Amino acid sequence: MYEDEAVTEPKAVPEPQPLTQFLQRLTQRVRAFDRRRPLVWDVLVTTFFVAAALVDAGGGWRNVAPNTEVPGWLVFLMSMGLSLPVLWRRRHPMAVLTVMVATALVSSWSGAMLQAALIQMLVLFSIAMRLPLRTLGRAGLMMTVPLVVGAARYPEDSWDQQIIPNLWAYAVVALLGIAVRSRQDYTEALVERARQLEVERDQQAQLAAAAERTRIAREMHDIIGHNLSVITGLADGGSYAAAKSPERAAQALEAIGSTSRQALGELRRLLDVLRDETPTPAELAPQPALTDLDQLIDGVRAAGLPVRTTVQGSPDSVPAGRQLTVYRVVQEALTNTLKHGGSGATATVDVTYGEGGVTVEVTDTGAGGSRPSGKGRGLTGMRERTALYEGTLEAGPLPRPSGGWRVRLHLPKVPEGQ
């Protein structure tokens, strides 16, 4: 044996699955098929018992019958009466059992004693699973009548040998149905309890989120209130000292800048916390829509930025969520122009409602090179909103020599049926 000879490790042999797990999976599949195709399952079960009853009616019934002279047509009718009603056992169990008991009574009276009478126990099982216990007791009494009639009319054996074994079989079937019913009720109770726990968990999460929002709002109030008060005092002091002591005025301006940067840093940390969490919106006022664009643009014009608008089409077919996205993108684009465009900048807003969706293009003549590179919160928010509706967003400087900045948004039309 060479030193470099590969050593093959034995493959792991999968452990055999226990029989109980196999039976559980098989039962689950059967139940799932029954829920999806109840009529198919009922037809299959009924076909099986009808075939078994007809096989017995072909001559096998004479082996145990006290009267072998029963006409063949009557045996056929009784076989069908004891097997065919199984098709309706789940929808009308007591009516089906009544028909089968009446047929079994004829079978006992005639002396045929068909083995198909045992199919009654399938209906008894369905009654035990679905109907109240008093109905189950009434069904048991009904099934006892043919036994008593047969034992009285053809007393070949003692009464206990003709009746008691059948009564024990009925009792076992009834207890089995009750056990299955109890198991199903227990499982449903567990599922309902799990659902309630999930609802309670969500409620606790909402309460915790509300408490956290309250805490953050209080901190923001303290930060803004404190720092604005400091800035106001510094500004008033600097204005008073400007005429007599320019050095003190310069110190006040430096302090204002330092305080402002500190306040902005703390606010950004709080906003990052809000971005990490996704609490339930607490706003009760209606969200902005495309009809509010004119008011938004009027406010921007009042702030000193000339804006020209063109609109093609009608926004009536645009859903509310997409309208909000368009509104926020236009708002953020014009805000960036105000902040970074510089003096003398102008803006243009073009909105087009077409067959393919809505398209918005916001351009300006400001200093495009001074804009954020995409790491800012504004552009990130625009891209996130656009991605919600599988749209596209383009933002960047316009080619020189004209310069400026362009933001282009396209949201596709809502597919049919959504």
Image: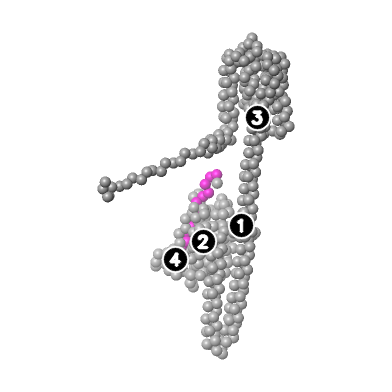
**In the depicted view, which residue is nearer to us: 125 or 351?**
125
Residue at 70%, 30% in the rendered image: 136
Q: Is residue 406 magenta?
A: yes
Structural distance between the alpha carbons of marks 3 and 4: 79 Å
Residue that carries the numbered disc 1 in the rendered image: 205
Residue at 26%, 46% in the rendered image: 1
Q: Which label is found at residue 172?
A: 3
Tell me which label, 1 or 4, sits earlier in the chain.
Answer: 1
Structural distance between the alpha carbons of marks 1 and 4: 36 Å
Q: Position of residue 29 (x, y in %)?
A: 54, 36
Q: Are marks 1 and 4 in contact (CB under 8 Å)?
A: no
Q: Are marks 3 and 4 in contact (CB under 8 Å)?
A: no
Residue that carries the numbered disc 4 in the rendered image: 373
Q: Are marks 4 and 2 in contact (CB under 8 Å)?
A: no
**Is 180 above or below relative to 226?**
above
- Is residue 109 visible to us here? no
Structural distance between the alpha carbons of marks 2 and 1: 25 Å
